[in-house]
Image: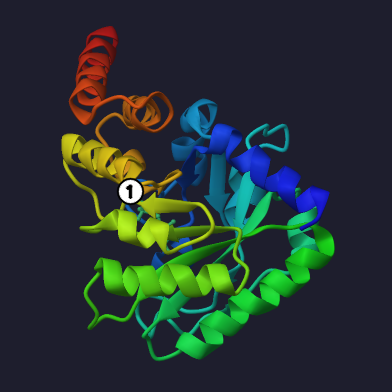
Amino acid sequence: MSWGLKNRVERLMKGGRTVMLAVDHGYFQGPTTGLEDPRKTITPLLPYADSLMLTRGVLRTSVDPDLEVPVVLRVSGGTSILKELSDEVVTTSIEEAIRLNASAVAVSVFVGSEHEKETLANLAELVNEGERYGMPVLAVTAVGREMARDARYLGLACRISAELGASIVKTYYCEDFSKVVNGCPVPVVIAGGKKLPERDALVLAQNAMAGGASGVDMGRNIFQSSDPVGMMKAVRAVVHEGARADDAFRLFDEGQAARQIAR
Ligand code: R5P
């Protein structure tokens, strides 16, 4: 592994933990609730993000170039919620990722889906290219629609991604999550998934950290919150300070009340 690749991973995971802000949802689901105006959503959250995961289109149009937060560039896509989601291709080259000063590229793999093989080949191709330029690859794992999101299938997808050379793997939290982490020799971060009540999302983060996650790559549970900045701070407390979900939720609740009074 080259020094450059290691350096990029370190930038993303200072101290081995990370709070990634995921705002790439539009690449397959269009103007997602909370991301209709990406700049408006992203800007106030930047001071609290360890990295920002997004497409080149949103990076170019909605983030100023004096950005100091490392970028994880979403480089797979080519399909939409109207079609088969696993039918993805690589949409953005490693050279473009370097031009955009990305710290990693992100690609989805759909294990057990119709286009499993193609998505795994996308990952392998990006790892091969990434090794040449010192660019880490984050594998965003999903499992087939008919498969349970459990430790068996998520563990399968994570392990395959690591075996193909991903530097970081993103998955979903599940029961027996430590089995997923223990079977995956690279850092694992969790997506938040659909919007939950804030306290539940913090419990999810707490449980994932207890199960050995290296952090979160969270989107909707942040930017669809009634107080996105407060939620970022609360998630940071869980990931970086080991705060209990209850204490982090109190932080969120008190902060939200104070901000409402100030308005
Ligand atoms: C999904 O493919 C996207 O890459 C999202 O970035 C990912 O699902 C994380 O966002 P959320 O926490 O909203 O699930």
Badge 1 residue CB within 8 Å of ligand 1: yes
Residue 90 shows in the view = no
Asked if residue 152 lies left or right of residue 79, the reply is left
Q: Which residue is mark 1?
A: 220
Q: Residue at x 80, y 49 (%)?
A: 4
Q: Residue 129 in the image: state x and y as whole percent.
A: 77, 71
* 212 and 117: which is toward the camera: 212
Q: Residue at x 29, y 72 (%)?
A: 152
Q: Three-letter amino acid code at disc 1?
A: Arg
* 122 and 14: which is toward the camera: 14
Q: Residue at x 21, y 25 (%)?
A: 249
Q: Quadrant of residue 137?
A: bottom right
In this view, 191 is above or below 224: below
* 55 and 35: which is toward the camera: 55
**Total count of labels:** 1
Q: Residue 124 in the image: state x and y as whole percent.
A: 64, 77
Q: Quadrant of residue 50?
A: top right
In this view, 256 is above or below 23: above
Q: Residue at x 52, y 80 (%)?
A: 88
